[in-house]
Image (cartoon, rainbow, N blue to C red):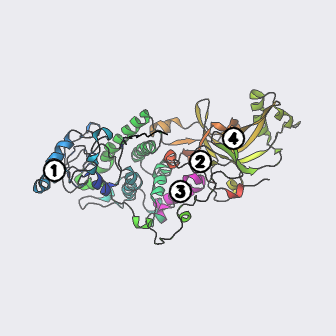
Amino acid sequence: MRDTTFISHLFLALGTADGPGLTYLNGLIGHHSKNGCRLYCGVIKLDARTITQPTRGPLTISLKVVRIQTLMSGTFPQALQRSTGETWCMFLCRLDTGIAKPSMFLGFSADHTFGIPKCFGSDIMHLISLNIPDLLIPLWRGTFECNADDDKSTWTWAVLTGNIWKDFGKAVAATTPHLPGFFDRPPHNPAKKINSGYKAWEFTLLLYGIGPLVLHNVLPLPYWQHFCKLVRAVCIISQHNITREELQVAARLFVEFIEEFEELYYQCRLEQIHFWTMERTIGNLVMCHSSRSTQRIDDYDPDYNKLLYPRWLKDLGGGYALLKLQECCRHDATFAESLEIKAFLDTYYPHSPEHAFFDPHMCFRVCRWARLRLPNGQTCRSVFSQRETQANARHARNVKLSIAGVLYFAEVLFFFEIRMHPDIHDLEPLALITIYSPPDRALLQDLSNTFYTCTHHGEAGLRVVRVPSIQSIVAMVPHMLVGEERFYMFEKPGMDLANLGGILWDEDEDDNQLI
């Protein structure tokens, strides 16, 4: 042991809060001032009646979004000096500069922060999950506030009315069985529930998950294509791991969405300028408080007393594990399944003792497993899982996997293990899957890589794959396209971020058995 003093210089990378809360951190007045941008971009609002400033229209010269300065780091210190000093001077300057007081974060060393206001990000939580849904859905329903000089009969985007709105709600509710339980709370029928406690996560799945599907052939084509750009951009920035190229794509799509929103909806008309909203609804936060102050910790955290690893788990290494339902003895696979297993064994393990389990009719006797735990904490089920056959069960048997560097989407039939060689007693974990077709390339490209729709190959798509090739669970929602049954694929928004806690839980108690 040595008498050592270690000095750690903490770095403040990013401070976040909602709109009202951020004023306490950055010292700015907020979005009601003419310097209303929380990033202090320098765009001055020319009309006090608006909360946000359009980039084009009757009230201002046209602005190019891509040319707006990201942060006016050089202007902010000068404006701060004007807003400090004598009290009377501060009150005279605060409306002009947008600065109400010096930020407490100015006390940090300039070498250990990005500076004010660079170290404060934008509020995408309320924007994506509450504000944008509260803007787009009322516009599509035709229930949005209408100026006295405007006429709703001219709103070509207001199509979710009458029976179309009811049918839309039924289509949303019908997707629930096809959304894995890992996707959390599914969106309820908005035609029945949207005004009675619709949750932020329900809005997120409704718009950025199944939105492109359920709005297909409902919204007019220009509005649907415009909406898909938003979906793609939001899905990119919601992920925990984002490449530079993806960020560039998201930035481009956001700019296009903003500019096209003004062309399609606002249309540079003074009576429709209120379509640009900010912080319309933050939600009923009172529901987050509990009157039971003595409530136990395990009531707040359902995973508090759960085992990290279930006792019926078979660890495969690398974060993968097999979970029961498990067959205690071998059973016959179908003829098509047996042919695919034999082709795999002949190619990779010609000396495997598993060849002895083919009968004279080429039927393979296999011991199947129902579920697989993935490294990201998800539990992938299979067709063999009993829960997948229950009425109204939420399917979790469709996966994204990588084979030789190529991404595929597939339905898992079952998991099993084989011996690779007579001299090797370790078992190789495998999965029998049926692969979906590649997507409709034309739709995918026209809709900003958002509308991923494919067909189910059935027995023609059977394939044996190694378990580590499986990456995550996806949703595959059936729908009709030009008279053909297809499947719309989407992944859980923000999936990587949602799993940072690393807790492993089990959601299929009924499957934990031998048969």
Q: Residues within 10 Å of mark 2 (few under 14, many from 20)?
A: some
Label 2 SS: loop
Look at label 4 and name its amino acid: Leu
Mark 3 highlights which residue?
A: 171
Dot 4 and dot 2 residues touching (CB under 8 Å): no
Which image quadrant is residue 462 in?
top right
Where residue 316 is drawn, which disc sits there?
A: 4
Look at label 2 and name its amino acid: Gly
Camera-near label (2 vs 3) is 2
Look at label 3 and name its amino acid: Ala
Going from N to C along the chain, the mark reached first, 1 or 4, is 1
Dot 3 and dot 4 residues touching (CB under 8 Å): no
Camera-near label (2 vs 1) is 1
70 or 232: nearer the eye? 70
Q: Is residue 174 magenta?
A: yes
Mark 2 highlights which residue?
A: 377
Where residue 83 is drawn, which disc sits there?
A: 1
Camera-near label (1 vs 3) is 1
Going from N to C along the chain, the mark reached first, 2 or 3, is 3
Q: Residues within 10 Å of mark 4 (few under 14, many from 20)?
A: some
Taking the image as drawn, is residue 336 in sight?
Answer: no
Look at label 1 and name its amino acid: Ser
Q: Label 1 vs label 4: CA separation?
A: 62 Å
Image side of residue 105 versus residue 136, left or right: left
Residue 433: horizontal and vertical position, in percent? 68, 40
Label 3 SS: helix
Label 4 SS: strand
Image side of residue 236 versus residue 430, left or right: left
- Start-end of magenta stretch: 165-192
